[in-house]
Image: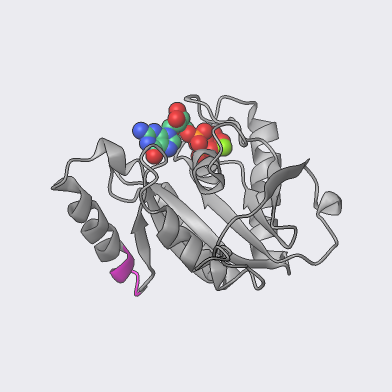
């Protein structure tokens, strides 16, 4: 899949605001601060398309990015700890739960997990939700630039083991928004679910 064009369309805070044009969607889901918005920027090849922060709780709306004017990448607020009022956090978490389970246009989810640590109970809670949602999904292990060469395959192996313990065989992709590693694997995986996805045009002299 080649991204010819990507632009922020809108941030959504209530079910009734979801787009009605029928474009297929792939969502970025995960705990606060794992790097969902950074991954959108990495995929887009833009530094500041999505806003990121060292402080958990930066993304507080379902942010829709239109790709190639045919489909959406959706950057979700994070699950778990965030420096915002409890009631506000609960409201968006309820909206994300409903979105993952009921949104007809949602074709697949990318579950981001911090590659530096074994999957946490809160990551596995999202796994349960994705099982309920009955969606195709993939795990992206983030921040691989912070791992040594030895630690990288270990991170993938322990994640696979945690999934196998739950009877799951899900693709695991190691990524870094700093070095852009994993970018093509993520795009290739998403292409299956987004329908129309043009390849990069060949130059006419080829
Ligand atoms: P919320 O919106 O709060 O749910 O967080 P998020 O999952 O969108 O995380 P965000 O992309 O804002 O990144 C959180 C922090 O992790 C920022 O300081 C990023 O710079 C950093 N970060 C994200 N991805 C990477 C990565 O691949 N490598 C490194 N070294 N840092 C990263
Ligand atoms: Mg974010």
x and y percentages locating residue 73 in the rendered image: 64, 54
On whether residue 80 falls in the magenta region, the answer is: no
Q: Is residue 70 left or right of residue 128?
A: right
Q: What residue sits 61% from the left and 36% below the top?
A: 50
Which quadrant of the view contains residue 59? top right
- Foreground pick, 102 / 190: 190
Residue lying at 51% horizontally and 58% vertically, measured from the top left: 110
Q: Is residue 113 above or below residue 134?
A: above
Q: Is residue 32 visible?
A: no
Say above or below: 120 vs 50: below
The picture places residue 11, in percent across and down from the top left corner, at 75, 41
Q: Position of residue 82 (x, y in %)?
A: 54, 30
Q: Is residue 73 visible?
A: yes
Compared across the picture, whether 161 is left or right of 65 comes to left
Q: Which residues are magenta?
A: 163-167
Q: Position of residue 54 (x, y in %)?
A: 47, 25
Quick one: quadrant of the N terminus? Answer: bottom right
Q: Can you say whether 77 is above or below 204 in the image? A: above
Q: Nearer the viewer, residue 147 or 188?
A: 188
- Above or below, 168 against 181 in this view is below
């Amino acid at each position: 899949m080649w991204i010819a064009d990507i632009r922020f369309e809108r941030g959504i805070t209530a079910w009734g605001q979801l787009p009605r044009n029928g474009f297929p969607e792939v969502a970025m889901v995960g705990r606060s601060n794992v790097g969902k918005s950074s991954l959108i920027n990495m995929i887009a090849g833009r530094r500041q398309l999505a806003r990121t922060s060292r402080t958990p709780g930066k993304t507080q709306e379902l942010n829709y990015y239109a790709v190639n004017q045919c489909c959406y990448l959706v950057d979700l607020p994070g699950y778990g700890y965030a420096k915002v009022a409890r009631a506000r956090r609960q409201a968006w978490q309820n909206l994300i739960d409903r979105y993952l389970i009921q949104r007809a246009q949602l074709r697949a989810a990318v579950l981001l997990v911090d590659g530096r640590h074994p999957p946490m109970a809160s990551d596995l809670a999202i796994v349960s939700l994705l099982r309920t949602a009955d969606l195709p999904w993939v795990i992206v292990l983030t921040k691989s630039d912070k791992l040594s060469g030895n630690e990288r395959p270990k991170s993938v192996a322990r994640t696979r083991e945690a999934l196998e313990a739950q009877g799951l065989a899900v693709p695991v992709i190691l990524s870094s928004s700093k070095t852009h590693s994993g970018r093509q694997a993520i795009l290739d995986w998403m292409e299956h679910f987004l329908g129309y996805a043009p390849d990069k045009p060949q130059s006419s002299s080829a």
